[in-house]
Amino acid sequence: MPEDERDSGNEERMRTAVEACASLLGAGEAARVPVVAGSVFQECLGRHGVKLPSVGEWLRLNPGEDPAVAAALKRC
């Protein structure tokens, strides 16, 4: 995302949009989202066995590479 868009508050909207569509990822597709405190989606992934990076780092969602991510995306 371009720097000027991040400054205008679009980063949060982009993160929630990616999280909302993550279950649609197919084999060979991936997405990255920033790990934030209080994300219900990220908390759900963690409860279903996905190892979350520290807050402020990036979480890579690739169901084709990680069976835990694939299973969690079906539930979250």
Image: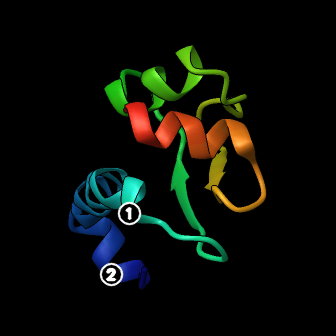
Which residue lies at the image location 53% right of the left edge and 34% below the top edge?
72
75 shown above or below 9? above
Quarter assignment of residue 67: top right
- Spatial CA distance of label 2 from label 1 is 28 Å
- The residue that label 2 is drawn on is 4
| Nearest-to-viewer mark from 2 and 1 | 1
Does dot 1 land on a helix, a strand or a loop? Answer: helix
Which residue lies at the image location 64% right of the left edge and 51% below the top edge?
58
Indicate the quadrant containing the C terminus: top left, top right, bottom left or bottom right: top left
Bin the neighbour count of mark 2 within 10 Å (Cα to Cα): few under 14, some 14-19, many 20 and up: few
Bin the neighbour count of mark 1 within 10 Å (Cα to Cα): few under 14, some 14-19, many 20 and up: few
Which residue lies at the image location 29% right of the left edge and 78% below the top edge?
5
- The residue that label 1 is drawn on is 24
Quarter assignment of residue 52: top right
Q: Residue 34: give its label.
A: none
Which x, y percent locates residue 75? 40, 31
Which x, y percent locates residue 66? 75, 48
Which x, y percent locates residue 32? 57, 61
Q: Nearer the viewer, residue 39 or 3?
A: 39
Counting every numbered tag in the picture gives 2
Which residue lies at the image location 31% right of the left edge and 60% below the top edge?
21
Hey, what amino acid is under mark 1?
Answer: Leu
